[in-house]
Amino acid sequence: MKIHEYQSRQLLAEAGVPVPPAEVVDSAAAAGEAHRRIGGRVVVKAQVFAGGRGKAGFVKLCDNPQETQAAAAFMLANRMVSPQTGPAGVAVGRLLVARAVDVVAEFYLGMVIDRVRRCPVVMVSREGGVEIEEVAARRPEAIIKEWLHPLLGLQPFQVRRLAAALGLNAPDRFRDCAAALTGLADVFLRHEASLAEINPLVLTADGRVLALDAKLNFDDNALFRHPEILALHDESEENPDERRARAAGLSYIALDGNIGCVVNGAGLAMATMDLIKLHGGRPANFLDVGGSVTAEGAVEAFRIILADPKVRGVLVNIFGGIAKCDLIAEALIAAAREVGFSVPVVVRLEGTNVQRARRLLEEARVPGLLTATDLTDAASKVCAAV
Ligand code: GDP
Ligand code: MN
């Protein structure tokens, strides 16, 4: 689960991470008033989950309340488009107005779980501000890592090493840098985050070390232990189709291709997407209907996929185990009756109750439905049809 920057910075500030004073607003007038209270120069920042706000013009330095009000009006009235949003962009409902600081240097601090070493890892870099993926690809040696003992957490000697790697070990700077590192690790471990990032952590002209941006993602499987984090959930930032799918008990991720996929099992879904790619197509979604799918859940899956205007064809690939082939066939027929298949639907069924499923589909004579004998046949048929 993702949360907003202002929520992340609040959690980090409570854990002792130094941040500039700021207010959250949802109107241009309120942004101007916030500027008057904060004083000096401010930075107005769109509160959306997608990154790349700086380059998209949705992080703006403003010298006076009039400028702040204009910048806020622009951000609230326009959708933000960045490499992380796709061409449609995202709407902006809230803004953070923070006191601006004079930046001398930008650093990166981040924390994730290292799945190979099976422990949390803290990463820092002097090349902050830009996306860390870029640094990792270009100059991996510029990222310094400390792996944490799962029970002992971030140790003082590691804090000293990381601060030294950033050149922030002089006594006056070390205190703030250590507070940022310790606070980040504290929030990450206490709330079972999957990602915690401060990018950039900055050194200011007056020698302070401050977190200017904050990003936290949480492990969905641990959220039941953290009602205080779950309470921060913002539904409006989710893809509406993904929300609908989750309500129906489906694992659905929207992608940007044009072949809709209805599959059971995450592994089979990945293999199906690979096969589509291999045959020159592009999947429009990842969809695992799961083992315990109901007829209604399966129909909902077809509704979601067929409502996507990008979808030019659908591949149904079911290996009937716990989810039975005949239930999927019935769902297909029901979906065809309800919404109609405006695009070709290629079906490959195998496994439990497959005979009954084939019979049902034959008898129903669903227009637009093509059957396939195996996975390769299914993938090539749907790619050819699209
Ligand atoms: P992101 O682009 O979505 O990651 O948004 P950030 O919050 O990281 O802001 C982008 C960039 O804006 C930062 O890397 C800084 O270079 C700049 N920035 C943000 N706040 C300030 C500030 O108070 N003063 C100055 N000079 N630059 C800032
Ligand atoms: Mn940033």
Image (tube, grey):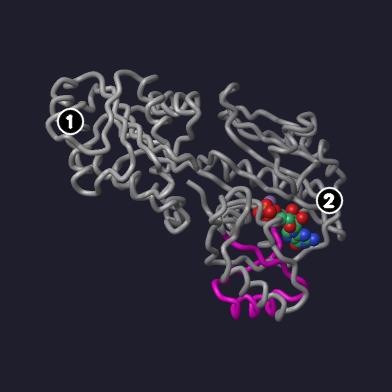
The x and y percentages for residue 124 are 74, 38
The x and y percentages for residue 258 are 45, 40
Q: Quadrant of residue 321?
A: top left
Left or right of 173? Residue 304 is left
Counting residues from the N terminus, which is met first, the one under dot 2 or under dot 1? 2
Going by the numbered disc 2, the residue's amino acid type is: Ala
In front here: 360 or 297?
360
The answer to whether the residues at label 2 and label 1 have Cβ atoms under 8 Å apart is: no
| Residue tagged 1 | 361
The x and y percentages for residue 302 are 29, 42
Q: Is residue 212 magenta?
A: no
The x and y percentages for residue 88 are 53, 56
Reply above or below: 319 against 159: above
Q: Is residue 18 something that shows in the picture? A: no
Reply above or below: 331 against 8: above
The crowd level at tag 1 (other Cα within 10 Å; few <14, some 14-19, many 20+) is: some
| Residue tagged 2 | 105
* Residue displayed at 64% across by 47% down: 183
Q: Mark 2 or 1, which is nearer the eye? A: 1
Image quadrant in which the C terminus is located:
top left
Reply above or below: 378 against 101: above
Stretch in magenta: 19-47
Going by the numbered disc 1, the residue's amino acid type is: Leu
Q: CA distance from mark 2 to mark 1?
A: 65 Å
